[in-house]
């Protein structure tokens, strides 16, 4: 007989100590990018005694672990990412990063450890499962398009999922709280790159030069005008120029300026309009001053869009497991990005956030994601394990009812 939903909390508690040991081992030994071989080895070792079929990604160190139930049926995918960030850790934890300049500051160590614990619990229920569960362990989420690589490697096929689910911890959200929203959850993440070329000269004689610095600054202002006046309030865009780099000393006008930024949007239409505006504004403002500009964008992740049916299932499960007050709908999307978006372009599903702040410490005073002092309250990870298990089993049993 399969576990009742309420039993998943007890099963997660039983897996707590090995899960935390795995999480801390991954945290102390972070890896960046698409090839996280040491992390992959730790994860596979933790899964080695389970009745899983392993399929490796040919272009990354990622893999999927497939659990076939006793009877055929639907297929559900549960995803956890594994890569770290290029940040020097300053938490002072006893299991802090042992690699200078690298840190699990986005919680991917917790995501992969929770997924392993869920796999252990669900494998114990293999005889009562109808359908298939795919556990997706993915590197390269932090800007490296890891999910896109794994999809290109065929890891969303044979079996093809009917639903997909992912969890992301949130260190400033009240511990144990679950939140998500239907539709747009996270933004697209394009990188904006430009070079403005003028003519260098002596800073005391700017009339003999063609100074590209004020030209670049004027273009940046014009871009903010575009965002404010040409994008709809209910279809928002964020365009941030984060670096303007030029010059070598105080008395030389440089010959060129490098501009770097990011564009975040929630719709394909506004994304394309923002890309075109960046190129047009940079090039035309430069031309108006007799300069030249080369402007382009590097394509980032698409917007992450949740299927309303999957969000409804998350809300139902969170309420059943932890109480109705432990789920709240996000009032607005977050303009950060996630490469789980690639999965959700092909498979209906949802990402949800799990609060991991210590009791009474949620809010702006806590170090957020991508911060060198980001920490979590590990007890709340048990709820993430239970959510994975309940989402998988309930979808296999009922589909989108």
Image (cartoon, helix red, strand yellow):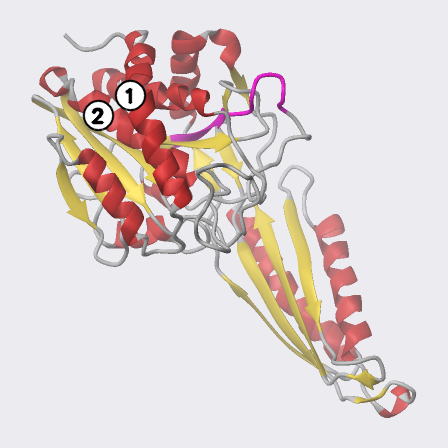
Magenta extent = 350-362
Q: Earlier in the sequence, mark 1 or mark 2?
A: 1
Residue under pointer 2:
120
Place of residue 290 in the rendered image (x, y in percent of width and height, measured from the top left): 77, 84
Q: Is residue 323 left or right of residue 225?
A: left
Q: Is residue 398 left or right of residue 174?
A: left
Give the number of marks: 2
User: What residue is at 26 percent from the left and 7 percent from the top?
Assistant: 4
Which quadrant: the C terminus? top left
Q: Residues within 10 Å of mark 1 (few under 14, many from 20)?
A: some
* SS for dot 1: loop
* SS for dot 2: helix
Q: Quadrant of residue 334?
A: top right
Question: What distance separates the C-alpha of mark 1 from that of mark 2?
Answer: 8 Å
Place of residue 381 in the rendered image (x, y in percent of width and height, measured from the top left): 41, 24
Outermost residue, bottom side: 208
Residue under pointer 1:
15
Q: Is residue 210 left or right of residue 51?
A: right
User: What residue is at 62 percent from the left and 68 percent from the top?
Assistant: 279
* Position above or below: 106 against 1: below
Place of residue 150 in the rendered image (x, y in percent of width and height, measured from the top left): 28, 50
Q: Quadrant of residue 390?
A: top left
* Position above or below: 202 against 365: below
Residue 200 is marked as none
């Amino acid at each position: 007989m399969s576990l009742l939903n309420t039993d998943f909390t007890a099963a997660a508690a039983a897996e707590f100590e090995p899960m935390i040991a795995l999480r801390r081992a991954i945290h102390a030994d972070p890896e960046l990018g698409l090839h996280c071989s040491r992390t992959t080895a730790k994860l596979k070792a933790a899964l080695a005694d389970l009745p899983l079929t392993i399929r490796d990604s040919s272009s990354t160190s990622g893999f999927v672990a497939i659990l076939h139930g006793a009877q055929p049926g639907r297929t559900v995918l549960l995803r956890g990412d594994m890569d770290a960030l290029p940040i020097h850790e300053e938490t002072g934890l006893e299991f802090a990063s042992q690699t200078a300049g690298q840190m699990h500051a986005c919680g991917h160590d917790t995501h992969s450890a929770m997924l392993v614990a869920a796999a252990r619990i669900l494998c114990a229920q293999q005889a009562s499962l109808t359908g298939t569960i795919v556990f997706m362990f993915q590197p390269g989420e932090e800007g490296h398009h890891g999910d896109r690589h794994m999809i290109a490697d065929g890891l969303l096929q044979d079996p093809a999922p009917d639903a997909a689910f992912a969890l992301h911890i949130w260190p400033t959200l009240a511990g144990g709280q679950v939140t998500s929203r239907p539709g747009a959850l996270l933004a697209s993440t394009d990188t904006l790159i430009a070079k403005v070329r003028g003519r260098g000269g002596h800073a005391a004689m700017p009339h003999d030069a063609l100074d590209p610095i004020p030209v670049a600054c004027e273009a940046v202002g014009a871009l903010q005008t575009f965002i404010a006046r040409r994008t709809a309030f209910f279809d928002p865009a964020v365009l941030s120029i984060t670096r303007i780099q030029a010059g070598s000393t105080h008395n030389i006008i440089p010959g060129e300026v490098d501009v770097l930024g990011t564009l975040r949007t929630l719709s394909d239409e506004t994304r394309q309009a923002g890309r075109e505006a960046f190129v047009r504004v940079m090039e035309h403002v430069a031309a108006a001053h007799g300069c030249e500009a080369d402007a382009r964008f590097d394509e980032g992740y698409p917007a992450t869009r949740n299927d309303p049916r999957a969000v409804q299932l998350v809300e139902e499960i969170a309420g059943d497991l932890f109480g109705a007050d432990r789920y709240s709908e996000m009032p607005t999307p977050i303009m950060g990005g996630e490469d789980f978006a690639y999965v959700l372009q092909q498979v209906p599903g949802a990402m949800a956030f799990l609060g991991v702040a210590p009791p009474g410490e949620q809010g702006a005073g806590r170090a957020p994601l991508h911060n060198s002092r980001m920490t979590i309250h590990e007890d709340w990870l048990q709820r993430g394990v239970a959510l994975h298990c309940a989402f998988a089993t309930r979808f296999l049993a009922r589909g989108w009812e």
